[in-house]
Amino acid sequence: MTHLRTCPLSGRTTLLSTTRHHRPHDYRVEERRLHDVDCPFCPGSGADTEQERSRLTSPDGARWSVRIVDNRYPAVMEDARAATAPADDHPLFPSGEACGRHEVVIESPVHEHRWSTMGEEHLSGLLQVVGERVAWLCGMAGAEHVTWFRNSGSLSGGSLRHPHSQLIATPFVPAHVGRRAEGARRWWSDHGTGYFEQLVAAELERGVRVVAATRHFVLLAPWAPRQAHETVVLPLRRQPRFGALPHEERRDLARLLHRASCAYERAFSLRGMNVVLQQAPIGAADAADFWCWHLELIPRNGAIGGLELGTGTHLVSTAPEESARILRAGLAALAQEVA
Ligand SMILES: [Zn+2]
């Protein structure tokens, strides 16, 4: 059964997909393995049989380096109508068809790869395929929002170690996304300038929350994080949606993500990391005025608690200024090693 239900008070949507019960969970296995015979994403195993949507091959063309395939346990489906539960048409119980696409990005054929070990060239290729696919999904009929997200580590919500992420195109604008887009639109009309460019300029001027600034991007610890040591990657050139980035920007972003992943591993003993692409709703035709895509890096060291779940208020034990200082030191140590 796959369908969506909405809370009439908050606008929050729940995707109900009972098939996801059957997903494999290799984080239940404690030891780390170089290759897992049961891993559905290793070459020669299960995902080879899923419908492939995109692939990047190695320079010699001998093998794939990134593949995008259909999710075997989709939260939304193109033919959701057939899988939808009977609706209750009372206004207390809003529901809908969970139409959309849910795909898996198998980020490498190598089971034990992480962003910190993949290398910049490989990460740049990954960003290329993901960007192209995000752009394609944004043009899909009925899609109201598209995101790319990554759950890695036992506390991330992920179920498999093999490096992978997911793309999802939903027929609704998630409430959190809609609220932030409205906030950015209001900022534009109140201040006459975009929130994101003003933020980047102010953070670069202050410096205390800036972890790294490159030619095209800035990595900073946000003013009001949800988790300790959270960071966000913002492009210096305002673009409403993530898509096919110019080659130089893509290489710059790959290098930054690689270095940031190394710095995180060096500085903290994390039990998980979520990466989320934040894009404007597809229907926001004026998004180019007020929105800029960004990538959130959200480290996970504990479960989400009652205060967070019940009120949306987050308790964080380290100031973002301190997180930025620690990560800056980690990046400086890495640079010294390379030199
Ligand atoms: Zn694997």
Image (cartoon, grey):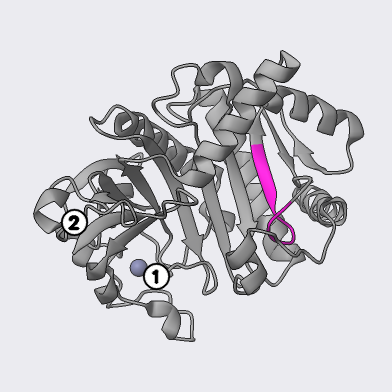
Say whether mark 1 is within 8 Å of ligand 1.
yes
Left or right of residue 11: residue 314: right
Q: Where is residue 187 in the image (x, y as percent from the top left)?
A: 69, 24
Where residue 35 appears, as percent x and y from the top left, is: 37, 74
The image quadrant where one finds the N terminus is bottom left
In-front residue for pair 242/251: 242
Residue 308 appears in the rendering: yes
Residue 300 vertical position relative to residue 319 in the rendered view, above or below: below
| Residue 227 drawn in magenta | yes
Question: Residue 265 at x, y = what percent?
Answer: 68, 64
Main SS of the magenta part reads: loop
The disc, 1 or 2, on the residue closer to the chain's N-terminal end is 2
Which residue in the structure is indicated by mark 1? 160
- Is residue 289 positioned above or below 310 on the image? above
Q: What stretch is highlighted in magenta?
A: 225-233
Q: Residue drawn at (67%, 44%), measured in percent from left and top?
A: 232
Q: Which mark is residue 138?
A: none
What residue do we see at 82% from left, 50% from top?
324
Badge 2 is on which residue? 87
Q: Which amino acid does label 1 sit on?
A: Leu
Q: Quadrant of residue 281?
A: top left
Q: Nearer the viewer, residue 185 or 119?
A: 185
The residue shown at (63%, 20%) is 237
Q: How crowded is mark 1: few (under 14 residues within 10 Å), some or many (20 or more)?
A: many
Q: Is residue 194 magenta?
A: no
**Placement of 227 over or under 249, stated as above or below:** below
Real-space CA distance between mark 1 and mark 2, rounded to the nearest whole angstrom: 33 Å
> Which is closer to the viewer, label 1 or label 2?
2
